[in-house]
Amino acid sequence: MKAELRANPPTITLVQNPNLFTTPSAAAATQSRSVSGAALSGCCLSNLDGACIEKLLLHCASALERNDVTLAQQIMWVLNNVASSAGDPNQRLTSYFLKALVSKASRLCPTTTFNSAAAVGGARRLMSVTELAGYVDLIPWHRFGFCASNSAILEAIRGFPKVHILDFSITHCMQWPTLIDAVAKRAAEDGGGPPLLSLRISVLSWRPNVPPFLNASIEEVGQRLTNFANYRDVPFQFDVVHHHEVTGQDSNLLLGQLNPSTLKLRNDEALVVNCQNWLRYLPDDEDDDHEEDDIRRSIPSSYGRDSFLETIRNLNPCLVTIVDEDCDLGGSNRSLASRITTCFNYMLIPFDALETFLPKNSARRLDYEEDIGRKIENVVGFEGARRIERQESSGNLWRRMAMKNGFTSVPFGEDTVKEVRVLLSEHASGWGMKKDEEMMILTWKGHNYVYATAWAPLDRAIT
């Protein structure tokens, strides 16, 4: 998706706008400074393509890390003249990267004032259940994972009279009405009458503090699911795993409750573990960045990804489904430059996709892009424990599961592939799907976007 750099580009001479990113000394010093050579070589201010914008972002980050406030201000001025939250996908994406760099600059250089458009985020936008349904349907990012996971779950639980799903997700159980409906339909196809399957879903009372946000409690969500299951004649139970000492972002004690007793595991139930956009919020176990320990307690190193997966494996589930974004931003040792390059090219996908079917001033589009902007700000603007967006590529996830944690991949069947293709046919033509390393990968114009995988512990692999 990267744009190609133009050959023999001109050098740009900038005149600093005295009202932007101002400090008295910097404004005077940079009034007519020429930014050339390694800084802005290759860019044309009147027509910056994606590759030039990416280059500017990298030079700005480099200047900030060297405490070169003057150069950082000048590059931000260029980016400010390119960025537009109402422009084309590159311009809209640039506006959020600029805000993220301003956020970072305000912490690296607290004595300097960096002004820009409104900061990313602000007050949390609470959605109704109806609004949330529209949100997850906007592009097939979430529905792709729901569809692939539910199909794999339905196949894995065939023949089990009782099923217990342990759900780790950020979408407030939006996945499960479709599964409940599929269970009911299977019973009807098998001869009518109520299904023999008893379905129990357990969720944690804690979730990462990331969009989407719902204006209802998890208990209210559970009651809605219970009502729907009753309507579909599916025996159903919804449990919330609480811990009285857990508050806010303090998930250490809560994740420590993942044991058979607290989860009320039963010998007559088949256990399924569902992870939708969840693993990225757990740090790598080997991360040794112990800055800001008060924040790290939100997801402490003692409960990193491998520790979490080991705990899950010890629960002996019949299936583990994992869905996440297919880009590599994990690890505390990832440089800022590396994160910017990966993030810029990856996050362009949803901006480009939304351009194909929503007008530039669409409120739904602006809200969705603002939520992406929150992720960009976290990836670019924060370090250490404050950087919670640590996506892991599908290849790295495969190696983590198969080589380090004792799982074997469970391939998706042809019925799953057909269901996903039907789902994608309802969206823009740029969306596609491919199978790779026994994974299913959602693509946009050929570029990987989201992967879906299914796993079983080695000692009880599904055949």
Image: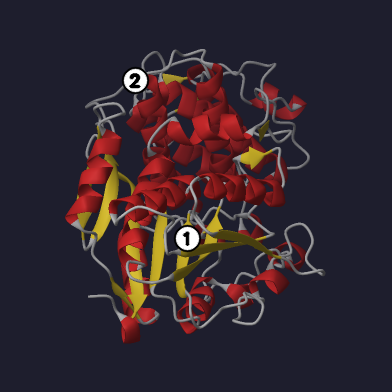
In this picture, is 457 found above or below 145? below
Q: Position of residue 300 (x, y in %)?
A: 66, 71
Callout 1 amino acid: Cys
* Helix, strand or loop at mark 1: strand
Callout 2 amino acid: Thr
Instruction: Name the quarter where the N terminus is drawn.
Output: top left
Q: Do the residues labelled 1 and 2 touch (CB within 8 Å)?
A: no
Pointer 1 or 2: first along the chain: 1
Residue at which label 1 appears: 275
Q: Residue at (40%, 80%) from the top-left corner?
A: 405
The mark found on residue 356 in the picture is 2
In this picture, is 194 found above or below 462? above
Badge 1 crowding class, 10 Å Cα cut-off, few under 14, some 14 to 19, many 20 or more, is: many
- In the visual, does 272 lie left or right of 101? left
Relative depth, front residue between 307 and 275: 275
In this picture, is 93 found above or below 310? above
Q: Is residue 289 in view?
A: yes
The residue furthest left is 414
